Image: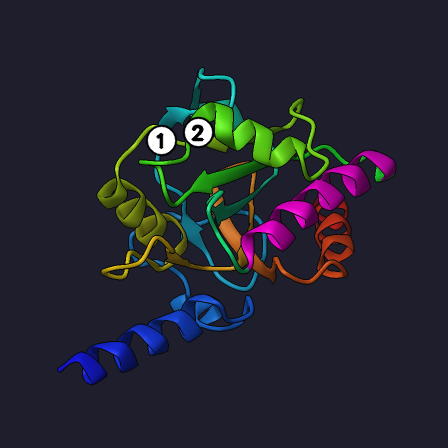
Amino acid sequence: MKSILLLLITALALTACGTASDGNNASGKSEETKGTQYKGDFEIEVQDFTFTNQEGEEFSKKQLDGKFWVANMVFTNCTTVCPAMTANMSRLQQQLADAGVEAELVSFSVDPANDTPELLKQYAEDRGATFENWNLLTGYNDEEIKQFASKSFKALVENPENSDQVIHQTTFYLVTPDGYAIKGYNGTKADNMKQIVEDIKAMN
């Protein structure tokens, strides 16, 4: 039984740590969505939320209305992909500024029990972040982030037993001003940040 469970967890980990094309395009257009004016690889309506940002303040989806934004999922105790993803989000932030492209950045913690606002802020600052257009969010429980990730991005979040690590997607999701996730990029690859900037620029 233990060996079967280990195989299942390994399979989930491989799925969660795949590139943007692994499972994202397959989600396709949600039958429940009304549609967006922007063309992408898929179309998923992001659910409403009000969470807590790195300043300990409420931050909601309504504050992103009318803006392009890029979302990802990280946690500060991550021993594998999150440091690179957070450094790449910082890289994206700088490239957006250099190109004069306006967009918001949002990182959702998948380990909310441990990721306090203060910890998230320090984690991002250590990797070059500034916070004028980047919010790192916590203030919910494990089940809430699992449901939110599944409904908003068709993304897996899983907490294996007897582990302090969390399985999650490595994707950066491009979200439109009308609130739909339409493209995914491998957030562990630094060269993908330029493509995000170009895609936002092309849609403006």
Residue 24 image offset from top left, x and y in percent: 46, 66
Residue 153 image offset from top left, x and y in percent: 41, 53
Spatial CA distance of label 2 from label 1 is 6 Å
Secondary structure state at the residue bearing disc 1: loop
**Residue 82 within the segment the image draws in magenta:** yes
| Span colored in magenta | 81-98
Mark 2 residue type: Lys
- Residue 106 horizontal side relative to residue 108, left or right: right
The residue depicted at 61 percent of the width and 60 percent of the height is 185
| Residue 162 in the image: above or below residue 49 | below
Instruction: State the quadrant of the C terminus.
Output: top right
**Residue 187 within the segment the image draws in magenta:** no
- Which label sits on residue 49? 1
- Residue 202 horizontal side relative to residue 15, left or right: right
Residue 69 image offset from top left, x and y in percent: 59, 39
The residue depicted at 59 percent of the width and 56 percent of the height is 39
Instruction: State the quadrant of the N terminus.
Output: bottom left
- Residue 50 horizontal side relative to residue 17, left or right: left
User: For the stretch drawn in magenta, what is the main secondary structure?
Assistant: helix
| Residue 48 in the image: above or below residue 40 | above
Which residue is disc 2 drawn over? 61
Secondary structure state at the residue bearing disc 2: helix
> Do the numbered discs 2 and 1 sit on residues whose CB atoms are within 8 Å?
yes
The residue depicted at 77 percent of the width and 39 percent of the height is 96
> Which residue is outermost to the front?
162
- Residue 148 horizontal side relative to residue 179, left or right: left
Residue 163 image offset from top left, x and y in percent: 31, 58
Q: Quadrant of residue 105?
A: top right
Determine crowd level at label 1: few under 14, some 14-19, many 20+ residues with C-alpha closer than 10 A: few
